[in-house]
Amino acid sequence: SMETVEKKIAEVFPTVVVGYSNKDYLKTNSKLLELMEVEEFHGEQGVLHPLQTKDNHLERREDYRFFYDWIDKCLEDYRQEFKLMTEKLSVSLSWANKSSNQNEHRSHFHPNSWISGIYYITDNPTPTYFETPLPGKTGIVVQSGGMLSANIWQCPASTGELVLFPSWLEHFTEASTFSGKRMTISLNVMPKGITSPLGLIEHTY
């Protein structure tokens, strides 16, 4: 029989992904879908990439205020939950994505942003996958049936949910068979005001 060995397992450099559920999502999403009917989108229909709204500052618009008020509440909760040393978290860029079943959203991350978010408007047939930036750095691959070799994580988000994640985290969707459109809102978030006052790294955004 194998001798029991003592061990400690440390969580080192964890990446945190947070999901917020909108309890009024049916009302919110039907209002968002009405707005999407008249919103201008650009991009080529039928290519891999989803269509995106021409306006990439939906957060500045009065007609979307009801939605971004809720987003702001989530961001304030995030700021407090993680004891972030910044005065506020503020949406810096936000747009909607519309895709049909042949579309996939190739692996990408969001530059010039600290936290990014995805809000799911429609019944969500294609999940978002997150990909670690770390594997393959040494060129040695040892396959494993456990968590050590898992480099892609399927986010379990559903309709009416906002997912917040570090902007450096690569993510993608795959093409899948469904009818209708998949609609999401993407957002980028930056710290605002005096940030990181301890030590000599303070900056005012």
Image (cartoon, rainbow, N blue to C red):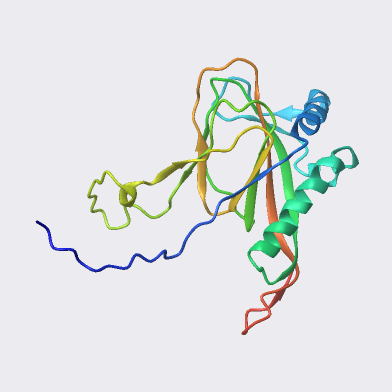
Where residue 158 sits in the image (x, y, percent)? 61, 34
Which residue is pictured at 58% across the width and 38% down the height? 157
Above or below 142: residue 98: above
Total marks shown come to: 0
Which residue is pictured at 68% across the width and 80% down the height? 197
Which residue is pictured at 53% across the width and 29% down the height? 104
Residue ranking furthest to the top = 179
Where residue 62 sits in the image (x, y, percent)? 90, 42
Above or below 18: residue 205: below
Q: Nearer the viewer, residue 8 or 101?
A: 8
In what quadrant of the picture does the N terminus appear?
bottom left
Where residue 26 sits in the image (x, y, percent)? 76, 29
Which residue is pictured at 25% across the width and 46% down the height? 144
Q: Quadrant of residue 96?
A: top right
Q: Nearer the viewer, residue 145 or 61?
A: 145
Asked if residue 178 lies left or right of residue 70, the reply is left
Residue ranking furthest to the right = 62
Q: Nearer the viewer, residue 81 or 14?
A: 81
Asked if residue 28 lies left or right of residue 83, the reply is right
Asked if residue 26 lies left or right of residue 17, the reply is right
Above or below 203: residue 65: above
In what quadrant of the picture does the C terminus appear?
bottom right
Residue ranking furthest to the bottom = 199
Residue ranking furthest to the left = 1
Where residue 37 sits in the image (x, y, percent)? 80, 23
Asked if residue 70 lies left or right of residue 160, the reply is right
